[in-house]
Structures are given as C-alpha cells and as structure tokens.
Image (cartoon, coloured by chain):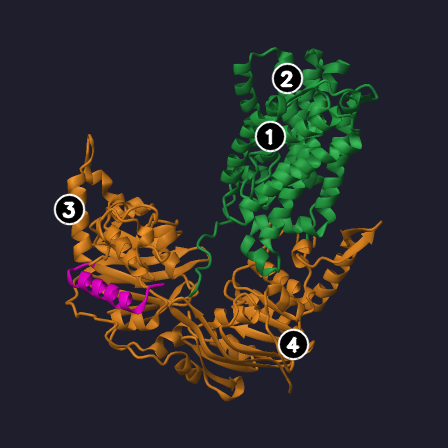
C-alpha cells in the first residue's frame, strides 16, 4: 500500500494553488491601494459573507449535476420579505426564519419541477427567475422596503475586532458546519453519488430524485441565509438588486474546481474561489477601473487562476522529459450483448 | 445440501422481446453456481431480476424456503443478496472507504445528531479486507485505481452488506491472468466462509475450474443444469448453441477477386497482438470473438481511429499510411459503428442530412449545397437499400432500428468505399430487419464491395461470411473457411 505524503498532496492540490494566487493578489492590493483601511477590509469581508453562503448552495447543487439560475432573484425575494417583516417590528428570530422559509419555498418549487416533471435544471430555474422578475413588480411598493430600523440593520453593520463584520463570522460558521456536514453525514455521500453516476446510485439503493429534491431544499435555506447577510447591511432593500448574482455564485463554484457535470468538487475549492472573486470585485474599485474594463479584467484573472490551478504538473514533466515506458492503452472493453 | 435461493418459472418481458421465459435456478448453500450462455441469452436480465432491478412478470422466487418479492436493489441487499456488476458501479470521486459503505454508512449520535462513524467504518472495512486477503488504501480516490482493484472494492462493498448470496457478473472480463488468479483466491476464501455465489461467465475454462454446478441458458430460456464434474465442455457448447440457420441468411456466392486489403503484423500495446489478415474483392469476412477480444479495437486500428504501434496496411497492393479516419476514407475504407445512436448517426437530424454528411464538400459549390443533387442522391440510396422512411427529411429518431442501421450503412456507402467494415450490423434490430440487412450486405458484396463484418451473433457470421477469423485476447486465434466453419469450432477457439 503506497501512501503519498499528505503535505505533498495538499501542496499540489488545486485549492492550495488557487489560494496562493488569491493571497498574492491580496498582498498586491493591500500594498498598493487604500484597501488596507478598516473600511476597505470590512467591505471585502462583507462581500465574502453572502457570496460564500450562496456559493455553498450552488456547489451542492452542482455536485448533484443540477443548478439554480434563480438563486439571485430568490435571494432578492427572501431579503424583501425579511425586511418587510423587520419593518413591522419583528426581531431577528422572526425575520431570519422568514428569509429561510422563502428560500425553501422557491427552491422546493424548483426541485419539484426538476425531479417530478423532469425539466432540466437550467431551463426550470431560468423560467423561475423570469417568474421572480414578474413577482417583483407585484410586490407592495414595487419590491422596495426602506427605513427598516436598527433591529434589521444592526446585524449587517456591526463589526468584531475592527476588521470583521458579524455577517462574515456567521458565514464562516455556516461554512464550517457545511464542511463537517459534507464529511460526516450520510446524505452528503448521496449527493456525490447521484451526481457522479445516477445509474450506479440507483443500484446502490439511493433514490436520485429524492436526493436532488432535498439538496434543492438545503440550497434554498442557504440562499435565505445569504439574503439576510447581504441585505442587513443596506439602508433599503430592493428585491431586484440581487438579480444576476447567480452568475457570481456559479463563478466561485467553477473556479473552485466543482464539475458542472456533477459528482466532483468540494467546499474548500468554493471557499477559496469566493475569496478570489470577492477580491477581484474589490480590486476593480480600488484600482479605479471603469466598469467596462473591469469585467474583462475580472474574466482574464479568473481564467489565469483556473489555468494555474488546473495544470497537472506531473503530466507536463512527462511531456517535457519523455516517458516511453508508459504507453497509453486505448480501446478498453467493448460491451457484450 | 439446502437450497438458499430458488427461481421457478420466471418470465420477464420487454416490449417486443421475451427476455426470460420459464427460467429456473437453484442455488445451494456454499456452492459456486455458474450461469453460462451466449451473448444476449438473458444472463444479465436474470441477475437483474434476482437483485430487484427488474420485476418479473411471472414466476416465483424462494429465499431460504420462503417465497419473497424483491422490490428494489436496496431490498435485495437487506435480504442478503449482493451483486457485482459487469460495468463498475463505483463513484470515482469518492474514496475507497466511502464507496464501500455508500448508502449504508454506520452512524453514531453526537449530541443527538447523526453523523457517519468513520472509525467504525474503517474497522469494518479492514475486517472485510482481511477476509478477502487484500490491502487497499482506504482514503484513496477510486478514480485513481485500476480495474482489478475496483473489482475487489465491489466485492468488499457487497460483503459490507453481510451478503450470503453473491452474484458476480462476468467478473474476469476486464482482468489480466494474474488478476484473475487473485480473484479466484478471493472467491475460494468466500466459499469456505459459506457464501453462496452465482457466477456468470462465458469462459468455459473458468467455469470448469471454479464452479460446482453450471446452468445453461439460451434465448432467455432454461436449458439444463449439471455438475461441472459430470459434463464436458463440448456438451456445454452444444447446449449454448442449438439454433438453426435458415433463410435469415440469404448469402449469394460471389467469385472472389484479388486481395483488396492486407494487414501485416499489426500491434497495439495491450490491445492487439500480431494481427495478420487479408480481404479479397467481393468477400464477406466475418470476425467473431467474445466481447472484449479486440474486434472493435482491430477495426479502430485499421481505420485510423486509434494509433497503432507497429504494422502495415496494404490496400490494392500498395502500402498506405492511415493515421486518421480521414486517411482511411481517402483510401476507400469506411467503418459503420456498432453504436449507431451514439456514434453512427445524429439522431435528431434528418435521413438526408445524415446520409450526405460525409460528402457535403462534394455536393456543394461556392454558393452552398446543391440541394437537387443531394436529394436525388439521397433518394437513390433510399431506393437501393429499401430504407423505409416517409421522405428524406424525416428525423432519424422516428425510424425503426433496422432502418436506422440501413441509413448508417447508406452514409458509409455514399463515400463510395472499396472496403466496408460493419461492426455488429444487426445489433438490436428485429428478425425481419435482420434478414433485410443481410440481404443488403450480400447484394453489396456481389457488386464487388469487400466487407468485414464484426459480429457477436454467431449464426450470422456462419450464415453470411465467406471466411471467418476468430479473435481471442487481442490475437487472431483461428481462421475458418465459410463452408467448413461450425459454431462449435468457433466457440472452441474463442473460449
């Protein structure tokens, strides 16, 4: 039995190289701009908070081989309802569950369309996103809530140890719980199994539809939490302001190495991906780039980061120095029948 | 000895096919019971009925003296029946440990929350590995492992359900000789532990080596059961075959011309070994052999789909260099895939679009495709191969299997080849269409086309081929002339 050195495995891992890349970028930004001020760092960590939680949701859906394009708009609805309830004077122990339940309901609808009616996740969630956009206009006051009062905004505006917003700490807690869950719950293995090989998972006695549906629910709850983390910092809540954010959650997930086809990836990758993507968004502001440059720049950095972390060093050395002993065996077994 | 599992008169029908008819099986405690039969005889269907993947339409299943109905694979596991499938059912991105216990991980409660008990899992896994006499890194990803190791993990997974009945579906199909030895040792250990096993295989040597009894199935029907000590391999083969060759094979005798294709000393590492063959003008050359014996791989190597290590290909007496399928087509070689839906045709496109796909450059000029020519050419093939389609713009998806196959042949013919390689030309088509496709093949040969026909359907090879090569483990193990070949001869070489 050959065991590779754990340290070597870690150093060669995609997450580590991506993390290193993020760190270098962080240092550059830190040294050259105003990013190092308390306000700059707080803003960065506040961004990370909601992106991280929503990206966890996106990651577990990706792992089952599904997706949810309505995540941004669901976040808007969850934030709106939470703010609405908060404005009526209810405390956090009411408005947070309201946001979570909103997330659960819309994710549940999505899950039913995908698992019961067998509509591809991409199409189903795209349709739901459009429905959400319609819902926004039907909401009282056009989906706006203002003057929520301190019971709502306190959570978003409080910082710990000067640099760390409370929402960031909450997001870290959610992340830690998620990592433990993905390691030690039975259900998490089903998520990987269904996404990796749905047919084989059936043969192992797993119900793929049920697994996908429950994953949607978990993701929905996480999106509800992400909504709270995002909106409690705002002076007013505008339901459609989170439209389009799903693309950012997809970016963090994919940059983190999770396979779009399902079955492959992990939360640590998403964690690092979130730090990178959030950093890029901040960098645009501090470098003072115009919007139209900033998106292109962001795209280029992401491609570089992904390439750097996806490079397989051992295969490159083989290509460079040759390894004639190893002949690639093609063909494989033809199926009988 | 007592019977742990008995199947009585099991019938399973799929739309249009009776996959199992009056199937019987008796498995005794601690025995290794082989089930053998030709490709498509219903072995795998039988196993899927036992493990609850399919529900039988009729018949009874008796487990330890009590009639049972198995609802789903999970139910089978809980009743102590586990199966190791031919195609691996492991999850590549999970670790070995997680794979073994997927779906039934041991759990413990920490503060009322159920979590996976990794320590317990590890302990159990090591116990199972000791029982099997193997040692695999529990934390490694399955995607990094070889086929033989994966097989062992499958067995470990089955044992983790504390299975008393273990079904092995062609476990040696993808293993090397040494790995097969290791597997047999493991099987012997399990047997001494009292595990009853059903062993599906069509490798007769293996059956005689390790099985106690053998049941033969043919065309979904039960043929016979015998002790391996009391039966000869010839007898088994005659049980497995026993079909008559009739007008399904309308072969026309053709005067053969010179060699069109010669292959000399073709080698491909681990796949093909020292292949020499020749093909004459107007000849139908059959290539028989078991699944995995290298038939398709040979076609791939000749057509340039895969790189060959050494070897020479001579067409019409001239050595040619074939490094890609484009080269092959330029030299008059075309290949019709066994998997028409995935590799042969674009099923969402029309008959015409599929048919003219490889020759569009010939059918178009500066301004685009010459539609009239395309249509008339397409109509020509539809008539000459009698493809039954309402019109040439009909979507492939809506055609029957036989007609789809004809379209893929027509597509190959549109290139105007000298040599046509057909891989399993009648797989998955019904008997009527089969006869028509055979008639078409025969007509093509009589017009001077040379045809290589790869097939698992032995009667088809016997009925159609002028000459037969039998492949085994990447080598050509035998050559027979069409009038001398019998099923027994082919099977003796192939097994």
Q: Give the quadrant of residue B65.
A: bottom right
Q: Against A83, is B328 above or below? A: below
Residue picked out by circle 1 = A72
Q: Residues within 10 Å of mark 4 (few under 14, many from 20)?
A: some
Residue lying at 29% horizontally and 73% vertically, measured from the top left: B462
Percent of width and height locating residue A336: 43, 64
Residue B122 disc label: none
Q: Residues within 10 Å of mark 3 (few under 14, many from 20)?
A: few
- Front label number (3 vs 2): 3
Tell me whether marks 3 and 1 sit on the same chain: no
Q: Chain of mark 3?
A: B
Q: Against A305, is A214 above or below? A: below
Residue picked out by circle 4 = B191
Q: Against B239, is A164 above or below? A: above
Q: Residues within 10 Å of mark 2 (few under 14, many from 20)?
A: many
C-alpha separation, residue under disc 4 versus residue under disc 2 = 66 Å
Give the chain coloured orange.
B
**Mark 1 touches mark 2? (CB < 8 Å):** no
Percent of width and height locating residue B36: 48, 76
Residue A283 disc label: 2
Please identify the residue farthest to the bottom as the structure is shown: B230
Could you tell me if residue A273 is visible in this image? yes
Residue lying at 40% horizontally and 66% vertically, measured from the top left: B15
């Amino acid at each position: 039995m050959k065991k590779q050195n754990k340290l070597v495995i870690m150093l060669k891992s995609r997450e580590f190289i991506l993390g290193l890349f993020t760190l270098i970028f962080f240092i550059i930004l830190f040294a050259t701009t105003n990013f190092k001020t308390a306000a700059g760092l707080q803003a960065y960590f506040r961004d990370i908070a909601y992106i991280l939680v929503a990206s966890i949701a996106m990651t577990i859906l990706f792992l089952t081989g599904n997706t949810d394009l309505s995540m941004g708009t669901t976040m808007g609805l969850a934030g709106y309802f939470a703010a609405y309830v908060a404005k009526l004077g209810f405390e956090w122990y009411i408005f947070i569950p309201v946001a979570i339940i909103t997330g659960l309901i819309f994710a549940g609808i999505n899950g039913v369309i995908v698992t019961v009616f067998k509509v591809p996740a991409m199409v189903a969630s795209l349709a739901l996103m459009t429905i959400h956009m319609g819902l926004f206009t039907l909401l009282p006051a056009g989906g706006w809530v203002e003057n929520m009062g301190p019971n709502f905004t306190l959570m978003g505006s409080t910082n710990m140890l000067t640099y760390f917003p409370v929402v960031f700490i909450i997001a870290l807690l959610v992340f830690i719980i998620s990592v433990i869950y993905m390691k030690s719950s039975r259900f998490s293995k089903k998520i990987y199994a269904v996404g990796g090989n749905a047919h084989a998972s059936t043969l192992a006695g797993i119900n793929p539809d049920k697994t996908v549906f429950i994953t949607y629910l978990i993701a929905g709850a996480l999106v509800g939490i992400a909504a709270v983390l995002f909106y409690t910092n705002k002076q007013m809540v505008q339901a459609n302001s989170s439209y389009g954010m799903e693309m950012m959650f997809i970016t963090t997930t994919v940059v983190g190495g999770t396979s779009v086809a399902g079955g492959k990836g992990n939360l640590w990758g998403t964690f690092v991906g979130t730090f990178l993507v959030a950093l890029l968004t901040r960098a645009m502001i501090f470098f003072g780039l115009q919007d139209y440059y900033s998106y292109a720049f962001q795209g280029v950095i992401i491609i570089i980061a992904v390439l750097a972390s996806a490079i397989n060093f051992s295969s490159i050395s083989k290509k460079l120095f040759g390894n004639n002993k190893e002949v690639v065996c093609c063909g494989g077994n033809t199926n009988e029948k | 000895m007592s019977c742990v599992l008995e199947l009585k008169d099991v019938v399973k029908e799929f739309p249009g096919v009776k996959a199992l008819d009056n199937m019987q099986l008796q498995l005794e405690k601690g025995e290794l019971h082989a089930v053998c039969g030709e490709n498509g005889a219903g072995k795998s269907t039988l196993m899927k009925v036992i493990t609850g993947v399919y529900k039988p339409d009729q018949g009874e299943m008796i487990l330890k003296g009590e009639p049972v109905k198995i609802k789903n694979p999970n139910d089978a596991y809980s009743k102590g029946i586990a199966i190791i499938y031919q195609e691996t059912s492991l999850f590549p991105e999970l670790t070995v440990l997680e794979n073994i216990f997927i779906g039934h991980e041991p759990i413990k409660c920490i503060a009322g929350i159920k979590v996976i008990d990794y320590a317990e899992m590890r302990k159990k896994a090591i116990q199972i590995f000791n029982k099997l006499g193997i040692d695999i890194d529990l934390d490694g990803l399955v995607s990094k492992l070889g086929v033989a190791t994966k097989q062992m993990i499958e067995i470990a997974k089955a044992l983790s359900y504390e299975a008393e009945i273990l079904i092995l579906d062609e476990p040696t199909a993808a293993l090397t000789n040494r790995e097969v030895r290791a597997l047999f040792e493991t099987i012997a250990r399990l047997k001494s532990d009292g595990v009853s096993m059903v062993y599906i295989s069509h490798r007769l040597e293996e059956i005689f080596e390790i099985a106690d009894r053998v049941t033969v199935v043919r065309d979904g029907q039960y043929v016979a059961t015998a002790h391996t000590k009391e039966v000869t391999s010839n007898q088994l083969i005659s049980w497995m075959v026993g079909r008559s060759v009739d007008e399904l094979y309308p072969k026309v005798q053709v005067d053969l011309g010179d060699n069109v294709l010669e292959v000399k000393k073709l080698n491909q590492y681990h796949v093909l070994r020292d292949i020499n063959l020749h093909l004459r003008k107007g000849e139908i050359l059959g290539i028989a052999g078991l699944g995995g014996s290298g038939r398709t791989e040979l076609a791939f190597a000749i057509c340039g789909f895969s790189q060959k290590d050494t070897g020479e290909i001579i067409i019409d007496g001239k050595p040619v260099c074939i490094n890609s399928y484009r080269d092959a087509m330029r030299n008059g070689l075309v290949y019709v895939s066994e998997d028409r839906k995935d590799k042969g045709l674009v099923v969402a496109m029309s008959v015409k679009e599929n048919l003219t796909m490889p020759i569009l450059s010939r059918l178009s000029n500066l301004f685009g495709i010459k539609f009239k020519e395309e249509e008339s050419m397409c109509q020509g093939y539809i008539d000459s191969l009698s493809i039954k389609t309402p019109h040439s713009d009909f979507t492939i998806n809506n055609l029957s299997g036989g007609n789809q196959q004809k379209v893929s042949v027509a597509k190959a013919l549109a290139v105007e080849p000298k040599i046509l390689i057909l891989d399993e030309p009648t797989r998955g088509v019904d008997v009527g269409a089969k006869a028509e496709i055979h008639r078409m093949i025969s007509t093509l040969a009589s017009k001077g086309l040379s045809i290589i026909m790869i097939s698992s359907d032995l009667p088809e090879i016997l009925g159609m081929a002028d000459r037969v090569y039998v492949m085994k483990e990447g080598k050509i193990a035998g050559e027979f002339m069409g009038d001398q070949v019998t099923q027994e001869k082919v099977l003796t070489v192939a097994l």
